[in-house]
Image (cartoon, rainbow, N blue to C red):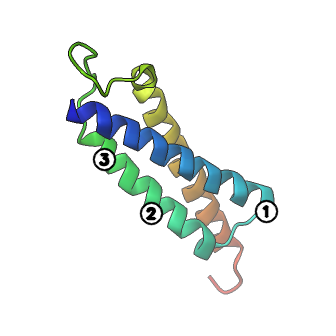
Amino acid sequence: MEEAFKVVTCICAYKKAEEMNDKLKVKGTHSEALIKPLLERLDKLKKAWQELPKEVKSENNPFYLPIIEDQSDYQVKVEQLISFWKQKVLESVQLQPGK
């Protein structure tokens, strides 16, 4: 039962991180200072996902929601965002003069 609640919490955290991601993309930012908080949030989220079971059963589980079935998709999306923004940080460092 507790696992279902944690999965839903992680999905909500992903949605919030996705909003931050979208705002940064719209601004076209490559500033490490702006990207770092998003990467920190995504890393925490990745760790939280790793502590959860791969599958949460719906039987006798009042906290179970159908969106939980998509948890592996959300985990992949977190990994993709981490990779994308780490690449942007690397690019911004390479573009800075004197580095």
Q: Disc 1 vs disc 3: Cβ atoms closer than 8 Å? A: no
Look at 20% across and 16% down and name the residue there: 60
Look at 24% across and 34% down and name the residue there: 3
Q: Disc 2 vs disc 3: Cβ atoms closer than 8 Å? A: no
Look at 67% across and 69% down and name the residue there: 92
Relative to 64, residue 32 above or below = below
Place of residue 83 in the rendered image (x, y in percent of width and height, measured from the top left) = 53, 49
- As rendered, which of 47 and 68 lies closer to the eye? 68
Q: What is the residue that sits farthest to the top in this orientation?
A: 59
Image quadrant where residue 95 sits: bottom right
Image quadrant where residue 1 sits: top left
- As rendered, which of 43 and 55 lies closer to the eye? 55
| Residue indicated by mark 3 | 48
| Residue indicated by mark 2 | 40
Relative to 82, residue 95 above or below = below
Place of residue 79 in the rendered image (x, y in percent of width and height, measured from the top left) = 47, 42
- The kind of secondary structure element at disc 3 is helix
Q: How far apart are marks 2 and 1 (CA)?
A: 19 Å
- Local packing at callout 1 (Cα closer than 10 Å; few below 14, some 14-19, many 20+) is few
Going by the numbered disc 3, the residue's amino acid type is Ala
| Dot 1 or dot 3, earlier in sequence | 1
- As rendered, which of 51 and 89 lies closer to the eye? 51
- Local packing at callout 3 (Cα closer than 10 Å; few below 14, some 14-19, many 20+) is some
Look at 62% across and 56% down and name the residue there: 20
| Dot 2 or dot 1, earlier in sequence | 1
Q: In the image, 47: left or right of 22?
A: left
| Residue indicated by mark 1 | 27
- Local packing at callout 2 (Cα closer than 10 Å; few below 14, some 14-19, many 20+) is few
